Amino acid sequence: MKEIIKSGTVLLTVTVIAGLCLGFVHELTLEPIEHQLQIALYESMGAVLPQAETYIEAEDFILTDTFFNLTRGKVNDDVVGYVVGVSSSGYSGIIDVLVGIDTDGVIQGISLLRHTETPGLGAKAALPEFTGQFAGGYGALRTTRSASPSQNEIMVITASTITTDAIVLAVNDALSFFEAYLR
Amino acid sequence: MSKISGISRIPRIFKNGIVENNPLFVQALGMCPALAVTTSATNGLGMGVATTSVLVCSNIAISLVARFLPANVRIPCYIVIIATFVTMLEFMLEAYMPALNQALGIFIPLIVVNCIVMGRAEAFANKNGAFLSAFDGLAMGLGFTAALTVMGAVREILGTMSIFGITISETFPQTIAMILPPGAFITLAFLMALINYVRGRTA
């Protein structure tokens, strides 16, 4: 009995001290982490909707897990476009895509905020060679294996069709959302 | 007095951790992150450094409290201590090195169950002072880091013709399988065989 009490007390002490240390470090890093996320987000917004000068998060829409961000891009007080954040399932985890759409429904650019795709394969989707294809697209995009895709076609990344499809799906979701609620 | 004899053990500790008893190639520990994370030299290096920092901290902490822990609860206590350090590492990476955090992803929390950390706690830290335990953690960590970086470099070079993100050749063919799981196993196998061959010759 005494042994059990001693063991229990030791475990309790260790976990309480551990908890306190963790709580301390957590508090310490809360702000920097928030800061990092904000930086990443605003950098991406500037990249996908460069014509806007200010980015204001939309208060009048309810966000979901799939549509995790909706921001209006403005110059002075005029809305010049929207930034829509859409999630979809990639090859090895969730991909968060930021899509910049102007008021005519034309994609200005896309950016991958977060992904865990394989380096050298699906991760190539984060590179401008791939994301650059989306600019100018509208309506609904398709994937193609052709080496010279037309305006609304996106060339598949070799050996990474799942990643490519996931991103095109996310972008099409953003476009449909625009058609339904923002046009 | 004991510090003097302690210091003289340090070179031996480093040789042990980096070469003779290399955690990955000789002890065959930490193979899961080694296979999964070494898709590039940078990732291998990052994971190695992260694991090393946990190793040093946990070795020090465990060597300090080992004598107070009853034998029947010592393992859970080690795990709590190790997990605490890993979680603190995670917070720090998220706050100050988000790119590395993204690259290593889920394998950072998996450092908790990396056998190297627990292994050194049981084999060294609970029997030695904090000073030497710190160096043992550092030595084993360096050995692991070197192993992971070499693995990552081999796979990155053969798989993408680049090293640390810098392209080596645009024309030489890339063996994509090297950055996929089969490449991981093959690279580990060949490197292990190489290390053991060299060890065999100099033994």
Image (spheres, coloured by chain):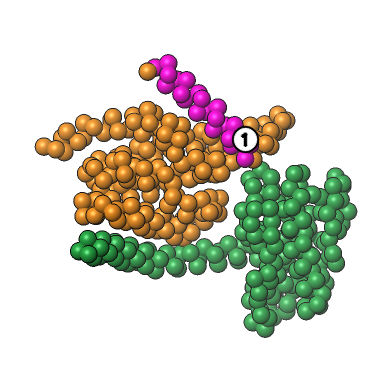
**Residue A89 versus residue B172 in the image, above or below:** below
Who's green, chain-wise? Answer: A
- Residue A10 visible: no
Q: Which residues are magenta?
A: B181-202
Q: Does the segment drawn in magenta span residue B123?
A: no
| Crowd band around label 1 with a 10 angstrom C-alpha radius: few (<14), some (14–19), many (20+) | many
Q: Main secondary structure of the magenta part?
A: helix
Residue for badge 1: B183
Extreme residue toward the top, this view: B201
Q: Quadrant of residue A72?
A: bottom right
Between B186 and A84, the residue placed more toward the observer is: B186
Q: Colour of chain B?
A: orange
Q: Viewed as shown, does residue A61 lie left or right of A146? A: left
**Quadrant in which the N terminus of chain A is drawn:** bottom left
Q: How far across and how far down the image is residue A150, in percent?
A: 88, 53
- Helix, strand or loop under label 1: helix
The residue positioned 73% from the left and 48% from the top of the image is A160
Q: Chain of mark 1?
A: B
Residue at the outermost front position = A1
In the image, residue B191 lies in the stretch drawn in magenta = yes
Question: As drawn, which residue projects farthest toward the left?
Answer: B1
Between B114 and B71, the one lying in front of the other is B71
In the displayed structure, does residue A163 sit left or right of residue B195?
Answer: right
Asked if residue A110 lies left or right of residue B133, the reply is right
Q: Residue at x 17, y 33 (%)?
A: B5
Q: Report the quarter where the C terminus of chain A lies.
A: bottom right
